[in-house]
Image (spheres, coloured by chain):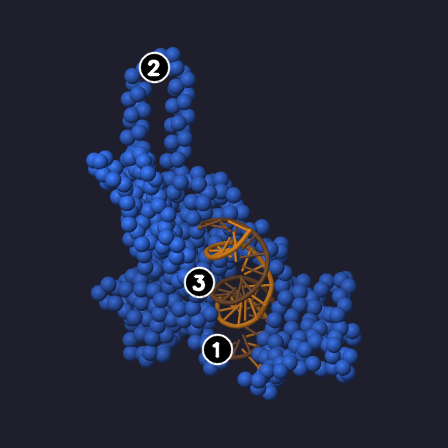
Chain colours: A blue, B brown, C orange
Amino acid sequence: MFICLLQLAKSQKDAEAAPFVFALVDWLREKRRIFSEDVILNLSEDSPVPIASGLKGHCWRDIAHDCRVTWLAFYRDSINDQVKYMYLAAQSGFKGQQDFLKYEKARRLKQFVVKIREDYSKKMKSNDSIERQLGTATYLIDFLALRVGGEKDTDEEADTVGCCSLRVEHIAFDEDKKEITLDFLGKDSIRYYNTVKIDPQAFKNLQAFCRGKKADDDVFESINSTSLNNHLKQLMPGLSAKMFRTYNASITLQQELDKLQPTLAKFKEEVERERMKKEAKTKTKKAKTEPQAAAAAATTTATATATAAAAAAEDSDEAPLKEQKVKRETDKDKEEQKETQEVLNVDISDVNQLVQFYNDANRAVAILCNHQRSIPKQHAASMARLQHQLSAIEEDLRECEEFLAFCKKDKQQKQFKFKSDFKTLKGEPRKSVVREGMKEDAVLKKIAQLKKKKQTHLLRMHIKDSNKTVALGTSKINYMDPRITVAFCKKYELPIEKIFNK
DNA sequence: CCTCCGACTTGGCGCGATATAT
DNA sequence: ATATATCGCGCCAAGTCGGAGG
């Protein structure tokens, strides 16, 4: 390939100042440079027109005075004639207000969502095929947070789809489990791959829609994004398909964050108990009585039970290391959950743990919205390093345990010796963690400390690995109502800048 | 209707700055 | 102090959605 940048200059002197104008790629003119002559500005009527660029004698293509739109300027791309806009930054009041409106609308959906869900359940059983397709598609958009999927130019653009443009080849059915597997390329050619149990009626419908069709036929041949959005408008003013993503993302965040509620309650209870104890102590300082000791004993038992429950919760959490789509909870599940609300193993007085907890909630949303990223280039290397650190901890543990065994044996024995061919990352031999004449309980303490260290290290590895393909930023910026985050931060006294930057 | 397109949101990526671990 | 991880931002392409125009 041959590439050459050309300047359009009348003389050598001009050339020094003149910018490159376009590129030649294999002698074809590619991407022309954009000049002010290409740009249309949008200004107030009474605003002075800024001087065009640094180049003398250049002017703007046009000046607009349209206060109904938010763009400041635009030009047409020389390659595909697409309009390129200039807008104010996201942190501007302009954008902020639009954002606020968006979340207000999503909030309004909450008042309608029960009705809408009843409606699509009914439509899914309708005799009318259009209604059946509208109902089923709306169900998928709500339940799986799919994009609407508008039609696009098939020859020029990438073959990506959304709900309404799904084809037969994108769905597989598991009759026994009533599960479907969706496998297609969505926006930005990001793969959506999800096996999920769905509503039985939706399952039946989708199967029927696909029956007798070719692989590349549309599943929903009777509807499209426009008709679906028109249908949604009848159920709620201003409703469109993408609002389900905003709504479900925000409500998922809320639900995830609420899971910390019992932990907070327990924490407050403990603080209160401490306070009471102190109070009682000062009151009865002179005359200590028996019943109080009994009460104190009772509280310690209660705390022990709670801790045991937390430990059990942690264990069950350990299980799935593999990537897995969140199974959306049905209303029934939610009911059941209310009764078995667990105290989580999160220390809510620890800022880092709170941030970690918030990120977990954020991740649930990102997985729902299928926000993926490619595995960072240094991921494997970085995991290997963590693995090495883990081995180091394990080696330290092994040494401590052998030393403990040595201590327990008769003291007649010679010196303690620990054989290890473990090397640090730099290839140096490892340093011993036990010292001669170390007391037995010191070793026990060390072991406990190392076990804890190993635990947190394992957790870190797990988090890193499960995060490697999940992008948290998009849902945070575009989908989760910031008011939910703010409320959470206030409630747990978590500084907001730990979550949002200025 | 359908198609096109204007306006705006959403999205992943890469890079340099900044925070954190060693 | 240095190495490494993470953040945060700019970039601009790829979507959504509504309305104009045929």
Q: Which mark is residue A157?
A: 1
Residue at the image position 27 percent from the left and 69 percent from the top: A173
The amino acid type, in three-letter code, at marker 1 is Glu
Marks 2 and 1, how far apart in space? 82 Å
Between residue A448 and residue C12, name the one nearer to us: A448
User: Does residue A68 sit above or below A446 in this rendering?
Assistant: below
Which residue does the numbered mark 2 point to in the structure image?
A288
Location of residue A306 in the rendering, given as x and y in whole percent from the top left corner = 31, 36
Picture quadrant of residue A280: top left
Residue B7 relative to residue A247: left or right: right
Corner quadrant of residue A177: bottom left
Q: Is residue B14 left or right of residue A387?
A: right
Residue type, numbered disc 2: Lys
Q: Amino acid at mark 3?
A: Gln
Packing grade of label 3 (10 A; few <14, some 14-19, many >=20) is: few
Relative image position of residue A57 (x, y in whole percent):
78, 75
- Of the pair A400 and A361, the residue shown nearer to us: A400
Q: Position of residue A47 (x, y in %)?
A: 76, 62
The local secondary structure at tag 3 comes to loop
Are the two marked residues, 2 and 1, in contact with CB atoms closer than 8 angstroms? Answer: no
Identify which residue is drawn at 33% across, 41% down.
Answer: A434
Disc on res. A378: 3
Question: Do the dots labelled 2 and 1 sit on one chain?
Answer: yes
Point out residue A119 in the picture as x, y percentages from the top left corner.
Answer: 38, 60
Q: Which mark is in front, 2 or 1?
A: 2
